[in-house]
Image (cartoon, helix red, strand yellow):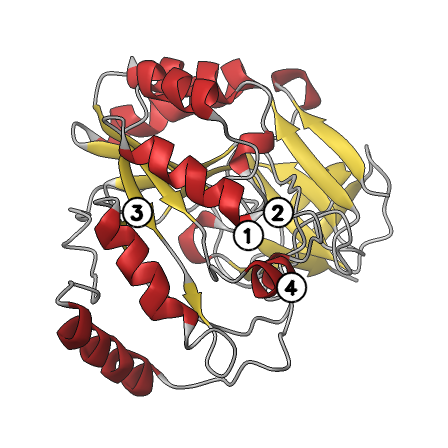
Amino acid sequence: MKQIFQITRESGVPLFGCIAFGIIDRGTSLIQIRPTSVCNLNCAFCSTDGGPFSRFHGTDYVVDKDYLVDNIKEVVKLKGDGVEANIDSVGEPTTYKHLTELISDISRIKGISRISMQTNGTLLNKDKIINLEKAGLNEINLSIHSLEPELAKTLMGDKSYDIKKVIDIAREIAKTRIVLLIAPVYLPGVNDDEIPAIIELAKEINAKIGIQKYEVYKYGRKFKAAKHENWWKFYKRLVELEKKHNTKLKISAKDFKIEKKPSIPEVFRKNESPYVVVKAPGWINGQMIAVTRDRCISINNCNSKIGDKIKIKILETKNNIYIGEMKN
């Protein structure tokens, strides 16, 4: 059973530095907003090993809405106009209790031009979709990987998963002003025959489609039946499908109108050895989250307790995501 750690202003845990929650800024006009790491499914190929039965994660996080909104305002102030807030997660964003209110608050921030969200769709219904539309949501990226009921259950890691319900949800979204993008992961050798059917569903309901490449990650789930192929083969497959279905499938950052913008400053250098204070359990088992300079650092193989002051070595700093280790 996972523990839930509440990230509030009073917790002393900043919203920058940890990949599992808060704000991820990669130096573009799109910022990733992660209000929670909780997920209701256990997808068989999940890149983050999310869900109730995770092997690598014993902690989930829920971020206080007002604390999150205040930090988003600061990032948008730095970047200027034309910022897209993409509500995503290492889990499922619709598990967040205050999702509609969060979207409403973000929509009122000067400089925000667009709000998008990733979801598996299982927790949505007609009323929730209408409320999300009214709150200011502009796009939903919906995960559908198979239209065949049994294969869909296997891929989503849940015997109660109902693909017919999710298709109905897709149809409801398509009736609103919210742009719908259906986002299947192509698993070679597993759902090859399903991808064409999903493309045709998208065409039927006037949705966009963005096919994702299956990748294997260190802390993700590996689906043994899926073959791993290189990017050349993947794009070759997309070109073939584009011709067959007369549909654009090769998508780049330009299609999403993502451009470079100022990034929040990195405050550590690799191999630097700062003193930090442990503030929370880590997302990956064996980690703890420590804090200094208004950033989180995930400390590997850390047996220190919350409140301890320790010296660490910074191992990774990319995109303001910080990983460290205890320093002897």
Q: Earlier in the sequence, mark 3 or mark 4?
A: 4
The earlier-in-sequence mark between 3 and 2 is: 3
Question: Which of the two discs, 1 and 4, labels the residue nearer the N terminus?
Answer: 4
Numbered circle sitting on residue 322: 1
Identity of the residue drawn at 42% across and 69% down = 194
Image mark for residue 154: 4
Q: Which residue is mark 2?
A: 297
Label 3, on which residue? 181
Which amino acid lies under the numbered mark 1 shown in the image of this protein?
Answer: Tyr
Secondary structure of residue under mark 1: loop
User: Circles 2 and 1: CB distance less than 8 Å?
Assistant: yes
- Which residue is found at the position 32% from the left and 14% from the top? 134
Mark 1–mark 4 Cα distance, whole angstroms, equals 34 Å
| Amino acid type indicated by mark 3 | Leu
**Is disc 2 surrounded by few (<14), some (14 to 19) or many (20+) residues within 10 Å?**
many
Q: Looking at the picture, how far across and down is residue 31, in whole percent?
A: 34, 39
N-terminal-most mark, 2 or 1: 2
Rendered residue at 42%/77% (across/down)? 192
First in sequence, mark 4 or 2: give its number: 4
Q: Residues within 10 Å of mark 1 (few under 14, many from 20)?
A: many
Q: CA distance from mark 2 to mark 1?
A: 5 Å
Q: Tell me which label, 3 or 1, sits earlier in the chain.
A: 3
Of the pair 181 and 199, the residue shown nearer to us = 199
